[in-house]
Every structure is written in C-alpha cells, then in structure tokens.
Image (tube, rainbow, N blue to C red):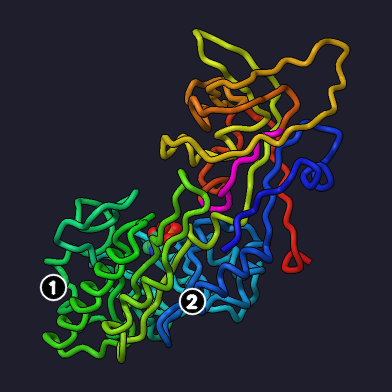
Amino acid sequence: MTLLKPTAAQVAALVDGDRPVCAFLHDLDALCRQARSMIGALPPGAELFYAVKANNAAETLRALAPHVAGFEVASAGEILKVRAAAGPDVRIIMGGPVRTHADIALLLAQRVERLHVESVQMLRIANAVAAEAGTTLPILLRVNLAGPVPGATLTMGGVATQFGIAQSDIPDALRMLKECTALRFDGFHFHTVSNNRDAAGHAALCTMELNLARAWATEHGLDLRIVNLGGGWGVDYADPNWRFDVAGFARALASASAGAPALQFECGRILAAYHAVYVCEILDIKTVHGRAFALLRGGSHHFRLPSSWVHDHPFLVLPRDAWPHPWPRPELANTMLTLTGELCTPKDVLARNVPVARARIGDLICFLMAGAYGWEISHHDFLSHPHPERIYLGEAAA
Ligand SMILES: *Cc1c(COP(=O)(O)O)cnc(C)c1O
C-alpha cells in the first residue's frame, strides 16, 4: 500500500505560487490501487463498499466508482453527491442513525438498493413511505451488540450509544417486520468499532457477528441473504507505514464466511486516509513560555482530525530555500515543535512537542494520511480564512 509523501519541488509545481501554500493533495491513482488491493484480498464473493462520509469529494467518488462494489451513504446529501459524481447506475446502500420521510422518498427515487434500519420507528417510516410509493424496499437490521467489545479508537456498539437496535430488542424488531409488508428483510448489519488495528481481533468480532446473524435466522425462520460487517479497519496515525493486515483478516474470516450469507464491508478510513496530504506554509515561529511554536497558513478549520482525536498528526518538514525578505530568516533548530493554525483559539493545534531538526518561516509542513475525516469534519468558515486548494493527481483525476 502506498503513502503519499511529496517533495517541496513537487508541491511547488502544483500549488498557486502567488499565495502562502495551503493545499490538500490527493493521489487518486494510489487511492484506486489501494481499493483494488483490498478487494483482491477479500474472501470470495465478499463485497467492499466505500463509506462516503470519510471523504465525499466528487473526484474521490468518481475515481473509486469503477473499483468498489458501490457506496455506503448516511444522508440524502450523500446520495445526491454520489449520483452527481458517479452517475445513475452505481450501487448505493444507506445507513445512519435517523431517517425522515423525505430521506426514504429520496432513496426510493434515487434507486438506493438497501436501507440499514436502526430503530423500530425507522422500520415504520420506511414501510409507510415504501407502501405509499407502491414498492418494496430491501433492508438490513443494524444491531448494537449486548456485550463489551475489545478496543478500537471509536466504539459504536457493545456500549451505550445511539446506533442500531439493541441486541435484546432484535426479536421484537423481527416480529414488527412481519407487519411491514413493503419491506423485504435481507439480513443484519454490524458496524461495531472504528479504527480497529487488531486484524485478528476484528476477524473474531466479525465471526461472532456472523454466527449471531445465522443463529437468529435459524431461530426466526429468516432468509438470510446478506450480512454487512461495517467498516472500521484501522490505520495508525503514530506510524504512517503500519498497515492493517487485510490478508490476515480475510484468512481468519475464511472458514466462518464460507457459504451463505453474502458478506458486505463498508470501509472509509482505510481506503481514503493514505493517498492525501495537507500541506501548509509556516507563516511565523515563536517561543512562548519555553515552548516552540510554528504557526501555519491553515489549521483545524481545514483539518480538525488531530484536534478531534487529540493526537499529534504525523508530518514532514519540507524545506524551501527561497526567502524574499531583507531581514534574517527566523528558524528553530533541534527543538520540540508545536504546530498551530491561524485560528484565534488555543485548540487550533495539529501536533504538540514533536522533535524537529529544523523549521523556518517559509518551510512547508506536510501532514500525512490526511485523506479521511479531514476536510469533511472541519468547520471551514470559522474565522473566514480562505479555503485550501484541493488538488487531485493521477489518471483517475483526468
Ligand atoms: C463511518 C461508518 C463506516 C466507515 O467507518 P470507517 O471506520 O471509516 O471504516 C461504515 N459504516 C457505518 C455505519 C459508519 O457509520
């Protein structure tokens, strides 16, 4: 798997040279290679969907469309973005914790192939809207597991969260479903953890979920066609070269996954993270209360991930020789550097006290692994600074 790591010269050739540098660079060919290599490792018959919320840029969606089975969306807006970017024929499946009548009407009109239902209220709304439209809507029931689930960065199930139907309520939901004549039950959906770095542990969790789905199907006499095991395959922001063991995960799942039902996965982070960087020019440096700061053109309004997760985002310093001013160029050498943005809040920090050999005003900071949950989760217009350039590279961008 690749990791985008441009040089200062490569960045210079791409960005607008008249302004301080602030840009996301995306290597779409690397993104597509990554998707193909993941799909090649999956158990036979398993399908990989792309979870759009990780990075919903039209360029990303268009590039991935020929490779993935389809797109997992979580809002009406994401349905429309996928249709606009990748056309009327790509497959879409839909999840998300709450749904309105208008959402269901739109998903029917836009030929979304299946809805992941997260509550009894959602079952009733989906059934009512599908019945009114005179159609049958295929669904999966999303389960929130009863038991505790071992560690990942974010936990969506096995603990008290708003997601899915509590495992103990699944029998009731199945009874209700019998009255929902405009819905077709296709199976169960699980997305229990996010950013799980333990491939063997993730395979064990998925095996348990698959067996639970099979047991319910037997007990309730259901035609179990599909089990969607969510996303959540991890990345390690502390070690950009580390990779989730996709092949090991698939091998560990192989015996449990043989035969029916068909498996689906819907991954976001692992697909989108590696192929993009966020590059910011150092506009100022200073030492305050003994701490060395580099202040960047950019910040958490473009890239909220490090402040959201309170981690030091991995970065490279890309030195640049040009210095246009008549005064001496300020620099920090062999220091513990804190990288902050241009916002008027002490929360605008992207990395804290990280050892750096040299950083000068005018050098570039290149944040690695910036493709997933970066721009998408950020408050772009707080303080009304200009947005970053967003540059897409590769044949898939043509
Ligand atoms: C966010 C999300 C995903 C993707 O998760 P990643 O950790 O990015 O792989 C998949 N399914 C659901 C339901 C989600 O909410």
* Quadrant showing the C terminus: bottom right
Q: Nearer the viewer, residue 238 or 102?
A: 238
- Of labels 1 and 2, earlier in sequence is 2
Above-or-below relation of 228 to 368: below
In space, the residues marked 1 and 2 are separated at their CA atoms by 26 Å
Q: Residue 371 location, x and y as percent?
A: 58, 52
Q: Which residues are magenta?
A: 364-372
Q: Which class describes the residues within 10 Å of circle 1: few (<14), some (14-19), or many (20+)?
A: few
Which label is found at residue 112?
A: 2
Q: Is residue 285 magenta?
A: no
At numbered mark 2, what does the secondary structure look like: helix, strand or loop? loop
Above-or-below relation of 283 to 274: above
Identify the amino acid type marked 2.
Val
Identify the amino acid type marked 1.
Asp
Within 8 Å of ligand 1, the CB of disc 2?
Answer: no
Q: In this view of the protein, can residue 245 be seen by the observer?
A: yes
Which of the 4 image quarters holds residue 45?
bottom left
- For disc 1, the marked residue is 172
Q: Nearer the viewer, residue 20 or 169?
A: 20
* Quadrant showing the N terminus: bottom right
Q: In this view of the protein, can residue 182 be seen by the observer?
A: no
Q: Residue at x 37, y 56 (%)?
A: 197
Within 8 Å of ligand 1, the CB of disc 1?
Answer: no
Q: Is 122 on the left-hand or right-hand side of 247?
A: left
